[in-house]
Amino acid sequence: MAPPRSHLLAAAFLVLCACTVAPPPALVAAAANVPITTCRSFCGNITVDYPFGLHAGCGHAGLRDLLFCINGALMLHLPSGSYRVLDIDYAYRGVTLHDPAMSDCRALDRTPAGRGNGFVLETWREPYLSPDPDNVFLLLGCRAASPLFQGFPDRHLPCRNVSGMGCADYLACPAWDDYYAAGRRWPGDGSFGGGDAVGGGGAPPECCAVPWAAIRAVNVSRLECEGYSSAYSLAPVRAAGGAAGWAYGIRVGWALPESNRGFCGACRATGGACGHDMESHADLCLCGDWNSTSNCDSTADAARSSAAAAAHFPRAVAAGRWAVLASGLTSMWWHASRSNLW
């Protein structure tokens, strides 16, 4: 005798339930095999490591959205423009930059409206990044109405030597001979003001050397200058040959909060990569498929337990499915047998 229709429907329902049991979402996520990212990468022949990063969440939050690798060239982007990164010195915390719109000892790059924008930082980034104290900015052809020359009693200008580098040496560069060979008038002997300035007849100085700390923003167009140059010194030794022996470029240093040093050290010691939260900008230790606010040992046991449970879950689910199906079919067979007996 065929089993009743109701028994067939019940059997079909049991099979469907057994086949559609799904693992909890939490265990699926824990089982995801996400490789640990080191956030260490390269651009050309330059290593990009903490506190910098080329990927979202890598590096320190104060230096985020700063470096970009474009066609194998490492570039640093700021409101004042883009600079080619020539070197990152992790031991001495220094970055060497090149601005194609900058003058040097061989050639002057000057226009009436200003060429290049110098070096300007976002206000929120200033505690983390700034030009080195031994970096001199040489502002060229600034107008008398420039903010650079306003507000100083007795016309005492902010122009001065920086680490032995100043306008007196810079004006001896071959670039100036070519510049004035075109019929331009030599400015004179410096009667406009004091400091390391060169001017004459009440005219503003042709060159004004300033340290970063004196003006905090080298914005060529806002300072009403025609151009600028920048040089840096890595040792307290006067360069041989004057300005011709200077290292031209912008040398920038970085600084991180003292508390970050202990955090990042503990993170790396436990196999993590130092990074930051992209929303709160707080420090994060990147530990593969999870992040920690301290280090990768803080919840490692819990993570391993979840992963182990997830690894065994498919076999447990399969066994449970067949147990449910066997139990249901056995019960149906027993009821069907009892029905036939009666």
Image (cartoon, grey):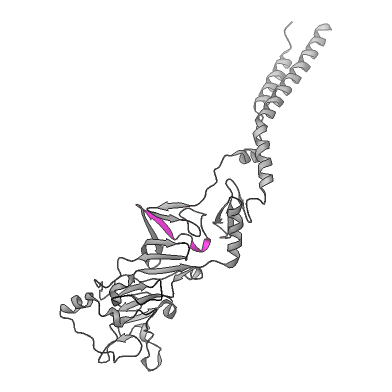
Horizontal and vertical percent for residue 113?
Answer: 28, 74
Q: Is residue 52 left or right of residue 299?
A: left
Q: Is residue 105 left or right of residue 275?
A: left
**Residue at image x 46%, y 68%?**
253
Q: Quadrant of residue 232?
A: bottom left
Q: Residue furthest top?
A: 1
Q: Is residue 280 above or below residue 245?
A: above
Horizontal and vertical percent for residue 334?
Answer: 80, 13
Q: Quadrant of residue 82?
A: bottom left
User: Is residue 341 within the magenta segment?
Assistant: no
Compare residues 265 and 229 and report the one nearer the observer: 265
Compare residues 270 and 183 and report the one nearer the observer: 270
Horizontal and vertical percent for residue 15?
Answer: 68, 21
What residue span does the magenta drawing correspond to?
51-70
Q: Residue furthest bottom?
A: 154
- Labels in figure, total: 0
Horizontal and vertical percent for residue 236?
Answer: 41, 76
Compare residues 153 and 51 and report the one nearer the observer: 51
**Residue at image x 26%, y 80%?**
171
User: Is residue 67 within the magenta segment?
Assistant: yes
Compare residues 159 and 216 and report the one nearer the observer: 159
Q: Is residue 103 left or right of residue 235?
A: left
What secondary structure predominates along the stretch shown in magenta? loop
Q: Is residue 116 above or below residue 149?
A: above
Q: Is residue 45 above or below residue 7?
A: below
Q: Quadrant of residue 7?
A: top right
Q: Which image quarter is the C terminus in?
A: top right
Instruction: Residue 24: tell me if it is visible.
Output: no
